[in-house]
Image (cartoon, helix red, strand yellow):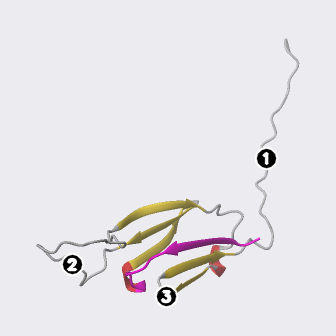
Amino acid sequence: RNLVFEFAMAGFSEESIDLQFQGDNMVLSAKEPEGFEYKEGVKYFKRRLKFKEIREQKYFVPEDKLDRERVKAVFKTGILKVTIPPKESFETKEGIKIEIVKEGE
């Protein structure tokens, strides 16, 4: 099953968004949109968009279960959709055998 993330990124451009894998996490950061300023002295009746920088939001994406080589990130109409497919085959780590000895020997 694919793991899918959707982020509302209205006002941001794809150039201002940084998305990368670090260990078992996908890390999302974005710079504050340029050219948008609230004007001093202007009283806003209602502001629905609050633009601010996004700093290293982490999302758990297990490296051993998801295929990071085939990740797809699409930015369209202010929505960033990231789809990460599962790995074709799971890599199981070999266990470490614990030797059991009889007490007194």
Q: Which residue is mark 1?
A: 95
| 41 vs 62, nearest the viewer | 41
Badge 1 amino acid? Gly
Counting from the top left corner in percent of width and height, residue 34 is at 26, 82
Badge 3, how many Cα within 10 Å: few under 14, some, many 20+? few
Badge 1, how many Cα within 10 Å: few under 14, some, many 20+? few
Q: Which residue is mark 2?
A: 37
Classify mark 3: helix, strand or loop: loop
Counting from the top left corner in percent of width and height, residue 72 is at 61, 82
Q: Quadrant of residue 39?
A: bottom left
Question: Disc 1 or disc 3, which is closer to the eye?
Answer: 3
Counting from the top left corner in percent of width and height, residue 32 is at 31, 74
Q: CA distance from mark 3 to mark 2?
A: 21 Å
Q: Which residue is mark 3?
A: 77
Counting from the top left corner in percent of width and height, residue 101 is at 86, 23
In the picture, measured across the screen, residue 38 lies left or right of residue 71, that is: left
Q: CA distance from mark 1 to mark 3?
A: 47 Å
| 90 vs 53, nearest the viewer | 53
Quarter of the picture holding the C terminus: top right
Is residue 48 a member of the stretch shown in magenta? no
Labels 3 and 2: the sequence-earlier one: 2
Q: CA distance from mark 2 to mark 1?
A: 57 Å
In the picture, measured across the screen, residue 52 lies left or right of residue 56, that is: left
Residue under the image location 39 percent in, 85 percent down: 13
Badge 2 amino acid? Glu
